[in-house]
């Protein structure tokens, strides 16, 4: 009789005879070890300062280095939810090794990420410096692009101004009707049982409508205020334009005309701002233009101007032929190793106006301007190329959308024609052999980065709400993208050695 095939021993309930070393649970060169080594190089004094300022009594905090390492590793492997991160510290060997067997509750993970968002955003620059020291940043050719990322809000929670007004009128009428019925019931019951009525006797239906009406009026008032401020900002911009034309006018009549128009625009801006505590900037902290609601000339919102009840900063945007409630994320990427040099978020759907602020942020982060920058037609503006060249960067920006089947392959040479405007000069530049070769690299530099972030790591929706919060989250996403590039570059160097 043939002998039976034997199996390897398996005893899941067998206790360890000797304490195991966690370093034996993962293979050499695992991403966890790289993250732990990287965190040791980071300056976390900003987080330490906040923690040390607290009362030393009470429950001890988790080590901030461990919490930062936990967030960095989680974002690297596509685990973004605080609940999933906390659960992974029990179920995932790599997470257990990283935390040293500690299991912070998901509320602690979320609170750490939320309370230290500015410090975590600052770590992005430290990660970029590590990539630069490793030779992954060359600043020869960089590319700028944007992508739409869904907000932590539903587009069905957005409401237009005209619908707000109609719903306010309907709810007011319904509340009046319910109040009338309640008064009738009170009168009847008082006759039967005597006078007196408790607060809990208010119908639940009436409470619900009053709550809805209060939220609706709050959102409607916020939209009206934002519309007035947007119109006032527009009048100030027009006043600045009139002042510039008056300064450059050669004829006295034109100067007087522009001075008069300047005065009128300033008066209208002041009238719209009357009673306002301050004038909120319509630019983000990174200098990118923010969305301005559509308004009438008197500063009232356009009927189609919208506001979301869940995340008021988010906007409805077109993405891939569909509409999403989200934000417009921006990234400047270096050609050599696809390192993100600068990242920012705005709630303005188009990319117009983002070119110069993103280049300025790149220069600030890297300490010097890149040689060349390429961007698609969404970033084109007549004054953009001159501003970029004044900063020390030559730009290659498409002036119009071209179909993939467009067979116009004419190649030019030499300088552009005399008297050509900025658009014609840029169009001529992109039709030269050098310009075509440089611009053709745009899509292979920056677009794969969004694919790696959205598809490979699964980051398709922000978890936090509000423009500043999602900016901090995007900084963390870009930081971990760069750390993954650095990790793989070091692995290649080890294999090559």
Image (cartoon, rainbow, N blue to C red):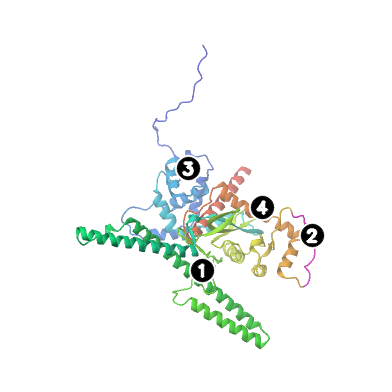
Q: CA distance from mark 4 to mark 2?
A: 22 Å
The tag earlier along the polypeptide, 3 or 1, is 3
Q: CA distance from mark 1 to mark 2?
A: 48 Å
Frontmost residue, 410 versus 387? 410
Task: Kindly identify which residue carries mark 4.
Answer: 444
Q: What kind of element bears circle 1?
A: loop
The tag earlier along the polypeptide, 4 or 3, is 3
Task: Kindly identify which residue carries mark 3.
Answer: 94
Q: What kind of element bears circle 3?
A: helix
Residue visible at 80% across and 63% down in the picture:
413
Frontmost residue, 289 versus 303? 303
Q: Magenta span has 209?
A: no
Report which quarter residue 434 is drawn in.
bottom right
Task: Kindly identify which residue carries mark 2.
Answer: 411
Location of the C terminus (image quadrant): top right
Do the numbered discs 4 and 2 sit on residues whose CB atoms are within 8 Å? no
Q: CA distance from mark 3 to mark 2?
A: 54 Å
Give the crowd class for mark 1: few <14, some 14-19, many >=20 residues within 10 Å: many
The answer to whether 47 appears left or right of 201 in the picture is: right
Task: Between label 3 and label 2, give the one nearer the viewer.
Answer: 2
The tag earlier along the polypeptide, 3 or 2, is 3
The stretch of residues the image draws in magenta is 406-418
């Amino acid at each position: 009789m043939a002998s039976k095939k034997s199996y390897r021993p398996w005893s899941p309930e067998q206790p360890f005879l000797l304490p195991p070393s966690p370093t034996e649970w993962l293979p050499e060169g695992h991403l966890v070890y790289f993250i732990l080594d990287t965190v040791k190089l980071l300056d976390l004094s900003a987080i330490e300062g906040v923690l040390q300022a607290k009362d030393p009594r009470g429950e001890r905090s988790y080590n901030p280095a461990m919490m930062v390492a936990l967030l960095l590793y989680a974002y690297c492997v596509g685990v973004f939810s605080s609940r999933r991160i906390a659960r992974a510290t029990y179920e995932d060997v790599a997470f257990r090794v990283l935390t040293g067997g500690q299991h912070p509750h998901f509320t602690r993970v979320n609170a750490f990420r939320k309370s230290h968002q500015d410090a975590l955003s600052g770590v992005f620059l430290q990660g970029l410096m590590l990539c630069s020291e490793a030779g992954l940043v060359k600043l020869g050719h960089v590319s700028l692009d944007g992508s739409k990322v869904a907000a932590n809000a539903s587009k069905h929670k957005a409401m237009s101004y005209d619908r707000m007004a109609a719903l306010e009128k309907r709810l007011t009428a319904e509340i009046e009707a319910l109040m009338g019925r309640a008064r009738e019931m009170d009168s009847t019951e008082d006759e039967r049982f005597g006078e007196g009525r408790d607060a809990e006797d208010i119908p639940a239906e009436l409470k619900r409508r009053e709550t809805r009406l209060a939220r609706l009026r709050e959102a409607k008032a916020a939209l009206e205020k934002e519309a007035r401020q947007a119109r006032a900002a527009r009048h100030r911009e027009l006043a600045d334009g009139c002042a510039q034309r008056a300064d450059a006018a050669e004829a006295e009549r034109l100067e007087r005309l522009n001075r008069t128009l300047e005065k009128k625009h300033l008066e209208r801006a002041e009238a719209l701002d009357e009673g306002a505590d301050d004038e909120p900037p319509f630019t983000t902290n990174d200098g990118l233009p923010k969305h301005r609601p559509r308004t009438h000339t008197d500063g009232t919102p356009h009927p189609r101007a919208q506001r979301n009840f869940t995340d008021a900063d988010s906007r409805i945007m077109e993405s891939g032929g569909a509409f999403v409630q989200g934000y417009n994320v921006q990234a400047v990427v270096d050609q050599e190793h696809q390192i993100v040099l600068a990242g920012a978020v705005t709630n303005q759907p188009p990319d117009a106006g983002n070119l110069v602020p993103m280049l300025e942020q790149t220069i600030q982060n890297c300490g010097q301007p890149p040689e060349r920058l390429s961007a698609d037609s969404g970033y084109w503006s007549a004054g953009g190329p001159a501003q970029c060249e004044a900063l020390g960067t030559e730009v290659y920006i498409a002036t119009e959308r071209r179909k993939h089947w467009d067979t116009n392959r004419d190649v030019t040479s030499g300088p552009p024609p005399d008297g050509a405007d900025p658009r014609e000069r840029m169009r001529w530049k992109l039709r030269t052999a050098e310009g075509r070769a440089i611009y053709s690299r745009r899509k292979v530099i920056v677009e794969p980065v969004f694919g790696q972030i959205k598809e490979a790591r699964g980051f398709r929706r922000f978890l936090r709400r509000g423009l500043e919060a999602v900016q901090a989250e995007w900084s963390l996403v870009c930081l971990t993208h760069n750390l993954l590039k650095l990790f793989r570059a070091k692995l290649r160097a080890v294999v090559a050695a």
